[in-house]
Amino acid sequence: MVRGLYTGASGMNARLSQMDVVANNLANVNTPSYKEDLALFKAFPEMLLQRQDDDGVIKFPLGSIDKRPVVGRLGTGVEVNEVYTQFTQGNLQQTENAFDLALDGPGFFAIQTPEGERYTRNGSFTVDRSGILMTKDGFPVLGENGVLHVKHNNLVISERGEVVVNQRFQEPPGRPVQMSENAFDQGEKIDRLKIVQFPRERYLQKVGSSLYRDTEPTGGPQAAAGEKAPKVQQGFLESSNVNVVREMVHMIEVQRSYEASQKAVTTHDGALDKLINQMAVVG
């Protein structure tokens, strides 16, 4: 009976963790490129219950016998196995800001941080006074040759990530430049965005500020190239892939499951109360 208390309590703890994941998804609905998380559970091994103290052979109506009849199985609880991130593509929303970049396809921008190289799909960038392309949190965006110095506001980025600036462009700062077919040949090619992919991106670890870090299971970052490389869309941002309606349904399901586990704990507590405080007194 005490095992039932632990089983119910483990269910409550698991649902609390799942509720945190759902709440975090809903809180980041409007965060560019946010990828929703799913809490995955695993059950503890079930226990096979048998009668241990029978002092003779038990006969059943059909004629079979068993010295230790099986009472049944008892579940011993559940726990959160992992929090899984779904890297499905979000919708692209046009912003008409030259410093907003979106990746259409699998891949990540490389970002320089004090803790080392990190990766993001959030292309909401800006340029500081020294002309360095930065994230909104002040981390430099990396090109293939290092930190990306764009120098001017009038920059254009191709679908392949090539960064070009030209003094002759007269567009207002922060607005996408309308370029002709040979405009890239006329401008000055600064660098190319460092865009990477991972063999097993599902194991990337979130570290906050829309950044990820690689882990041993992900494999090392690989330069995105060829047909599988994502296209860079300037003047766009990728929206989150969170479905609000689905997350609200998940929240209701989690709440109901938590209440069911809570009811199980209450029921077992009441049974123990009767066993100890009533039956023991009668005995």
Image (cartoon, rainbow, N blue to C red):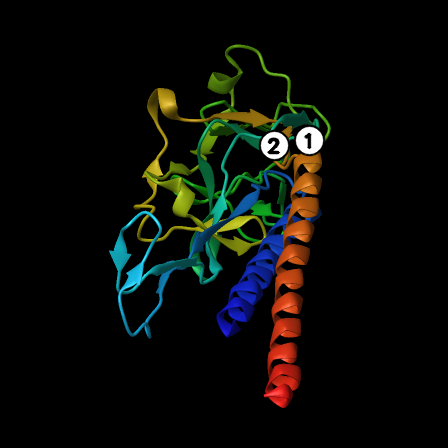
The image shows a total of numbered marks equal to: 2
Crowding at label 1, few (<14), some or many (≥20) Cα neighbours within 10 Å? some
Residue 59 to residue 189: above or below: below
Residue 10 spot, x, y in % from top left = 53, 64
Q: Residue at x 52, y 69 (%)?
A: 6
Within the image, what quadrant is residue 178 found in? top right
Residue placed most toward the observer, 14 or 143: 14
Residue placed most toward the observer, 251 or 218: 251
Which quadrant of the figure contains the C terminus? bottom right
Residue identifier under label 2: 238
**Is label 1 in a helix, a strand or a loop?**
loop
Residue placed most toward the observer, 5 or 105: 5
Nearer mark to the viewer, of 2 and 1: 2
Q: Residue at x 65, y 79 (%)?
A: 273
Crowding at label 2, few (<14), some or many (≥20) Cα neighbours within 10 Å? many
Q: Residue at x 62, y 27 (%)?
A: 91
Q: Residue at x 68, y 31 (%)?
A: 97
Q: Is residue 277 left or right of residue 183?
A: right
Can residue 24 be seen here? The reply is: yes
Residue 42 spot, x, y in % from top left = 43, 53
**Is label 2 in a helix, a strand or a loop?**
strand
Q: Earlier in the sequence, mark 2 or mark 1?
A: 1
Q: Is residue 116 left or right of residue 90?
A: left
Residue identifier under label 1: 97
